[in-house]
Image: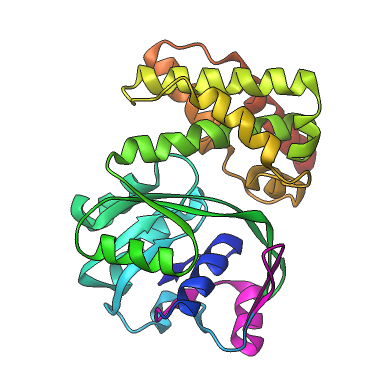
Amino acid sequence: AIIGAGGVGSYYGANLAAAGAEVFFIARGDHYRAMKESGLRIDGEVGAQRFDEVEVYETAAEVVQGNADVVLSCVKMYDAEEAARICASVLKEDGIAFSLQNGIDGPAVLEAELGERRALAASVIISAFIESPGVVRHVGSNQVINLEKQSGLATEFFHLCAKAGFEASQVEDPQVLLWKKFVRLVPLSGASVLCRAPMGFVAENEHLRFVLRKLVEETIAVGKAVGVALDESIVDGVMARIDKSPYEFKPSLLLDIERKRKNEAAWLSGRVIELGRQSGVATPYNDSVWAVVQGIGRREAS
């Protein structure tokens, strides 16, 4: 089951179905109606895919309850609690759910509904968004999925992901799994929001590269202060990744701001600031990103 069939959920779910899994989606609005009537199309550099028929529902009430082995919760963090309740209703008693939310708090929300054993961490590295109802645009070639390692269903699902063509891995420590993405996503999102521009613009500007590096160092310092085993080499890894990103790549935070949608800044830079204050680590660069997001929200509200 794919809870939250936006760009990411639609992409991973469609490819899992193509690999032989029985997949159903819960989607919303025009995207739901287009998927229901005409199926789903994935466009991108790695090729176009067309799925003429997909099993899609608008609400959990329409779904046969308790029939899913695995659920991917792909909603934004501000909808995570509602999604966790849907996960509980559609999962089999021994089924498991993976949180694919941005940030580090998604698995804890799932755990509150499902219990520790059935709520697992995951992270994805991909740029995919709804270009028009029923059509998802995949930018670049990344289709990474990192999964918390567990025997049984979780390992079966890992093998299915590999069969689907994803760059899949299993990670023993769920906190390291989450933070390795977090220390990339927070800085990349922050730098792009500061200049309201894609990653290519950030990569070619020496001043923005300096700010990006400071955001990475700051986020790593907070992670280490709260007990996460992070390696300083991640800094160079993030800088190398930005140079490999397509020029037009935009983090989801910037896309949401551009489209005047609710955004996840509170769970990204906002979360770094919160944990920094709790652990005594200064976060001036993330404070600046947070201030800019507040300013954008104020202007749009007026």
Residue at horizontal 57 percent and vertical 89 percent from the top? 53
**Displayed quadrant of residue 95:** bottom left
**Displayed quadrant of residue 289:** top right
Residue at horizontal 38 percent and vertical 19 percent from the top? 224
Horizontal side of 85 relative to 236 (left or right) equals: left
Which quadrant would the C terminus be assigned to in this image? top right
* Magenta-drawn stretch contains 103: no
Q: Which of 55 and 232 is in front in this view?
A: 232
Does residue 287 appear anywhere in the picture? no
Residue at horizontal 48 percent and vertical 73 percent from the top? 26
The image position of residue 217, as x and y in percent, is: 54, 18
Which quadrant would the N terminus be assigned to in this image? bottom left
Q: Nearer the viewer, residue 107 or 21?
A: 21
The answer to whether 226 is drawn above or below residue 147 in the figure is above
Horizontal side of 296 relative to 103 (left or right) equals: right
**Displayed quadrant of residue 174:** top left
Give the total of numbered labels. 0
The image position of residue 115, as x and y in percent, is: 20, 53
State the colouring used for the structure image: rainbow
The image position of residue 178, as x and y in percent, is: 40, 40
Q: Which of 60 and 21 is in front in this view?
A: 21
Residue at horizontal 81 percent and vertical 25 percent from the top? 205
The image position of residue 2, as x and y in percent, is: 45, 69
The answer to whether 167 is drawn above or below residue 203 in the figure is below
Does residue 231 appear anywhere in the picture? yes
Horizontal side of 151 relative to 174 (left or right) equals: left
The answer to whether 282 is drawn above or below residue 170 in the figure is above
- The magenta-colored residue range is 21-49
Horizontal side of 196 relative to 270 (left or right) equals: right
